[in-house]
Amino acid sequence: MKERLTVAMPKGRIFDEAVELLRKADYQLPPEFEDTRKLIIELEHEPLRFILSKPMDVPTYVEHGVADIGIAGKDVMMEEERDVYELLDLQISACHLAVAGLPNTEMSKVAPKIASKYPNIASQYFREQGEQVEIIKLNGSIELAPMIGLADRIVDIVSTGQTLRENGLVEYATIKKVTSRLIANPVSYRLHEREITDMVARLRNVLNVHA
Ligand code: PRP
């Protein structure tokens, strides 16, 4: 009898691609998986339980061991630095972290302000550039900040670039390419090594990558 694994799934932009990938790897996710408001979903024919969480919280559930494994963006992993194993680059939800702002503008000479939902990534980036900045933490719609005079620049995810374009903003620098990763709790990894390595193998097969 296989052990039931708990998988933390990020709701939002990564979710649909992650579901598609799991289905390609032959996990029998029910048709209503995408539409339900349920937060815990147990599979009937697989020893798997999914918990549906905010993307930023996935590494927290995995680090605390209430989820054995999870799917998390590299952006979230960089921001949080949790004690988890990164097992596989799932090559989904490709995007990048960028510095953006209003076109043809200089940053303020004194205490430039940077708005971001990634305060750690933003402050590390500007520290490395030798710039002293003030970080303003926001939780979403980051692009508003330069438009309404809250910040000189933002640090945010750019995927299609549509949000920047439609709001008249431009990119000033790329910080890092981002894709989603399969992560595991280190203790769970030891306890459920067989089940977890089986999942990694099935996903690798779909992704056509080899160890
Ligand atoms: C993300 C990100 C940008 C947008 C980029 O926001 O913060 O706002 O998507 O995507 P694009 O380049 O394809 O336009 P998200 O939709 O996750 O919502 P949020 O504003 O609540 O963070």
Image: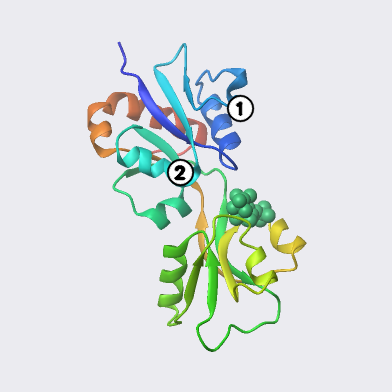
Percent across and percent down for residue 110 are 52, 88
Image disc number at residue 15: none
Question: Mark 1 or mark 2, which has the lower sequence index?
Answer: 1
Query: Is residue 55 shown above or below 165?
Result: above
| Quarter of the image that includes the C terminus | top left
Residue 126: image location, x then y, percent: 46, 75
At x 45%, y 43%, the residue is 72
- In the displayed structure, 131 sits above or below 88; it is below
Instruction: Tell me if residue 16 comes above or below residue 136 in the rendering.
Output: above
The residue where tag 2 is placed is 72
- Quadrant of the frame with the N terminus: top left
- Give the residue type that dot 1 points to: Glu
Q: How many marks?
A: 2
| Secondary element type, mark 2 | strand
Residue type marked 2: Ala
Q: In the image, is 82 to the left or to the right of 162?
A: left
**Residue in the image at 46% along x and 11% along y:** 45
**Residue marked by disc 1:** 34
Is residue 15 visible in the rendered image? The answer is yes
